[in-house]
Image: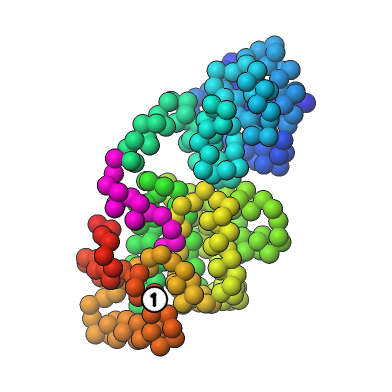
């Protein structure tokens, strides 16, 4: 049996996915995110969808990649789009693909671009950017940390994330004891970083889906809502943080993850060492400089001098200085 949601328009948009929990959540939000008016139909069985389309035709069908090629080719639709579990797959059997384990807003955005035939145009715009400004700046794990407090670190991290998110998918994670989440993240999300860590401990298989459903959006930037209780944050081990980061890069679409780090993070130096780049904000005043020197000395004395090799020092309200050869964010 199919379920349908009417929008008052005769144009049909069919969704067929055997992953019922995922399809229900997608179906509940997707109609609100897509541009245009459609009559939506949801199917969990490709045979039922095929039977339905024998008596009518859809303008668009969105199908899970588990559907057989023959079924997809024979389905009556103007545009066919495939949901895939491979974040790198762009096309299957000649049809455009959308990675299923990402926020619904991103799925809708990709579908809108496909329907407007603008996806190729978007890729060309990104490719025309200077290589050193895209490849070297936007991919990998980026840490933002400073031993000096109240100097605009979170604001800097969010601005950096939004700039990179113009080019590739980015996830922002605030790992401060007192993040002020209600001030920075106006969009209400039910789950936070603590829920994400709990989910991972359950050893489930659908991590990509869980992470994408927990993410909020700030423009093009995705974020996980920070933990409310500092003691809960301190209780997370360094190994748990490293496992979480590995899982995000393995199971999710994100090419860049930005960590807004605070002193309450266990295994802080190990997390910084894992980053391909660390931004450290500072102030040009005596007390702040003393804190910065102490932090750098601690890294060297504890065997983490390599963190300094991929650190970018940025004066709060001033210009950026680097300790490596590649160019800095302007």
Q: Going by the image, does 103 lie left or right of 143?
A: right
Instruction: Out of 136 and 239, give the one closest to the viewer.
Output: 136
Where 245 sits versus 120, above or below?
A: below
Is 134 contained in the magenta span?
Answer: yes
Q: Going by the image, does 29 lie left or right of 155?
A: right
Where 89 sits versus 113, above or below?
A: below
Where 52 sits versus 289, above or below?
A: above
**Position of residue 83 measured from the top left corner of the image (x, y, whole percent):** 60, 35
Instruction: Out of 68 and 142, give the one closest to the viewer.
Output: 68
Instruction: Out of 222 and 133, give the one closest to the viewer.
Output: 133
**Magenta-drawn segment:** 128-142
Other residues around mark 1 within 10 Å, as few (<14) / some (14–19) / many (≥20): few
Quarter the N terminus occupies = top right
Quarter the C terminus occupies = bottom left
Mark yes or no: residue 192 visible.
Answer: no
Q: Going by the image, does 111 lie left or right of 285?
A: right
Instruction: Residue at 37% x, 46% y: name it.
Output: 166
Instruction: Residue at 59% x, 18% y: name it.
Output: 77
**Position of residue 9 measured from the top left corner of the image (x, y, whole percent):** 57, 18
**Position of residue 110 measured from the top left corner of the image (x, y, whole percent):** 48, 35
Instruction: Residue at 67% x, 41% y: name it.
Output: 22
Is 188 contained in the magenta span?
Answer: no
Instruction: Out of 21 and 312, give the one closest to the viewer.
Output: 312
**Position of residue 45 measured from the top left corner of the image (x, y, whole percent):** 74, 29
Where 290 sits versus 81, above or below?
A: below
Q: Secondary structure at mark 1?
A: helix
Question: Would you identify the image quadrant in which residue 78 lies?
Answer: top right
Determine which residue is flagged by label 1: 306
Mark yes or no: residue 267 visible.
Answer: yes
Question: Would you identify the image quadrant in which residue 295 lies?
Answer: bottom left
């Amino acid at each position: 049996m199919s379920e349908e949601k009417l929008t008052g328009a005769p144009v049909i948009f069919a969704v067929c996915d055997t992953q019922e929990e995922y399809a229900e959540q997608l179906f509940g939000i997707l109609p609100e995110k897509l541009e245009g008016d459609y009559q939506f139909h949801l199917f969990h069985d490709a045979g039922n969808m095929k039977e339905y389309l024998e008596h009518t035709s859809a303008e668009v069908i969105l199908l899970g990649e588990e559907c057989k090629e023959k079924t997809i080719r024979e389905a009556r639709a103007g545009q066919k789009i495939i949901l895939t579990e491979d974040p790198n797959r762009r096309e299957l059997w000649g049809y455009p693909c959308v990675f299923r384990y990402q926020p619904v807003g991103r799925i809708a955005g990709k579908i809108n671009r496909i329907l407007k035939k603008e996806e190729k145009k978007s890729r060309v715009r990104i490719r025309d950017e200077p290589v050193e400004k895209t490849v070297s700046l936007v991919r990998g794990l980026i840490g933002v940390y400073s031993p000096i407090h109240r100097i605009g670190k979170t604001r800097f991290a969010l601005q950096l994330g939004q700039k990179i998110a113009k080019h590739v998918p980015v996830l922002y994670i605030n790992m401060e004891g007192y993040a002020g989440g209600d001030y920075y993240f106006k969009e209400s999300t039910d789950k936070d970083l603590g829920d994400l860590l709990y989910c991972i401990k359950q050893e489930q298989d659908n991590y990509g889906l869980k992470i994408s459903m927990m993410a909020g959006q700030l423009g093009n930037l995705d974020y996980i809502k920070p933990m409310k209780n500092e003691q809960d944050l301190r209780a997370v081990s360094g190994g748990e943080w490293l496992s979480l980061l590995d899982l995000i890069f393995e199971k999710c679409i994100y090419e860049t993850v930005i960590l807004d780090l605070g002193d309450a993070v266990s295994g802080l130096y190990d997390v910084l060492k894992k980053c391909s780049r660390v931004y450290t904000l500072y102030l040009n005043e005596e007390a702040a400089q003393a804190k910065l020197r102490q932090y750098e000395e601690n890294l060297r004395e504890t065997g983490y001098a390599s963190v300094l090799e991929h650190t970018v020092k940025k004066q709060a309200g001033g210009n950026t200085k680097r300790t490596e050869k590649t160019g800095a964010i302007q």
